[in-house]
Image (cartoon, coloured by chain):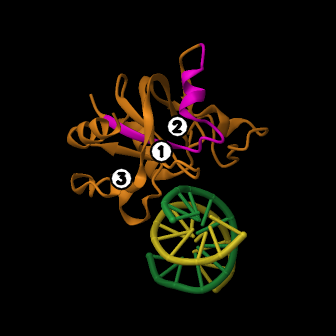
Chain colours: A orange, B yellow, C green
DNA sequence: GCCAACGTTGGC
DNA sequence: GCCAACGTTGGC
């Protein structure tokens, strides 16, 4: 099993929104970055654990945990002209963008702040804290996961 | 809301 | 295939 970190803007979709989903599953769509797409398409696997990270908000940081319930498959919003994620250059035969489905696992009692993550010496290699940190889907090593999970508790 | 860092686009 | 212009991300 592998570990990941997914970013979301809580004003649009938060850990609470995920927790409140009655069907307990949520398509993680709208990712329009090639590096992130490659992870979703090729590497994110069933049962992998995911940190849910809140960005562009008051409390920036890791808010909880989700789990992958369906591995990568084409993001259908790219084919919908009504969607803001519509991509006219993509095709059904050769989809450009992918998504996975996740379900809620837990919400931390506090958001683990980005500033605190940056201050952890063992987390210096995580893309979140490197080179601008703009990647929206990123791998987390098992060691990093344990450190962050413990710190969030 | 500012702005730095980064990714994408398109002319040549 | 270079690279300037432009758009987006995201912390502060």
Image x and y of residue A73, in percent: 50, 29
The answer to whether residue A18 is above or below residue A89 is above
Query: Is residue A48 shown in magenta?
Result: no
Label 2: few (<14), some or many (≥20) within 10 Å?
A: many
Q: Secondary structure at mark 1?
A: helix
What whole-number distance in Å separates the C-alpha atoms at marks 2 and 3? 32 Å
Q: Secondary structure at mark 2?
A: strand
What whole-number distance in Å separates the C-alpha atoms at marks 3 and 1? 28 Å
Question: Is residue A48 toward the left or the right of residue A59 in the image?
Answer: left
Give the residues in magenta. Answer: A3-22
Q: Are marks 1 and 2 on the same chain?
A: yes
Q: Are marks 3 and 1 on the same chain?
A: yes
Residue that carries the numbered disc 3 in the rendered image: A116
Residue that carries the numbered disc 1 in the rendered image: A37
Choose mark 2 or mark 3, whichever is in front: 3
Residue A48 or residue C6, whichever sits in front: A48
Q: Secondary structure at mark 3?
A: helix
Choose mark 3 or mark 1, whichever is in front: 3
Label 1: few (<14), some or many (≥20) within 10 Å?
A: many
Instruction: For mark 3, name the chain.
Output: A
Please give the label number shown on residue A98: 2
Instruction: For mark 1, name the chain.
Output: A
């Amino acid at each position: 099993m592998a570990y990941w970190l997914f970013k979301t803007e809580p004003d649009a979709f938060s850990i609470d929104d995920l927790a409140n989903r009655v069907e307990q599953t949520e398509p993680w769509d709208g990712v329009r970055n090639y590096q992130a797409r490659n992870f979703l398409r090729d590497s994110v696997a069933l049962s992998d654990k995911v940190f849910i990270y809140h960005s562009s908000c008051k409390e920036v940081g890791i808010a909880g945990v989700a789990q992958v319930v369906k591995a990568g498959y084409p993001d259908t919003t790219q084919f919908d002209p009504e969607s803001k994620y519509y991509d006219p250059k993509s095709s059904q035969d050769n989809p450009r963008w992918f998504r996975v489905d996740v379900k809620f696992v837990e919400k931390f009692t506090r958001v683990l702040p980005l500033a605190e993550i940056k201050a952890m010496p063992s987390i210096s290699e995580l893309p979140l804290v490197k080179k601008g940190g703009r990647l929206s889907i990123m791998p987390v090593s098992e060691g990093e996961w344990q450190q962050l999970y413990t710190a969030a508790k």
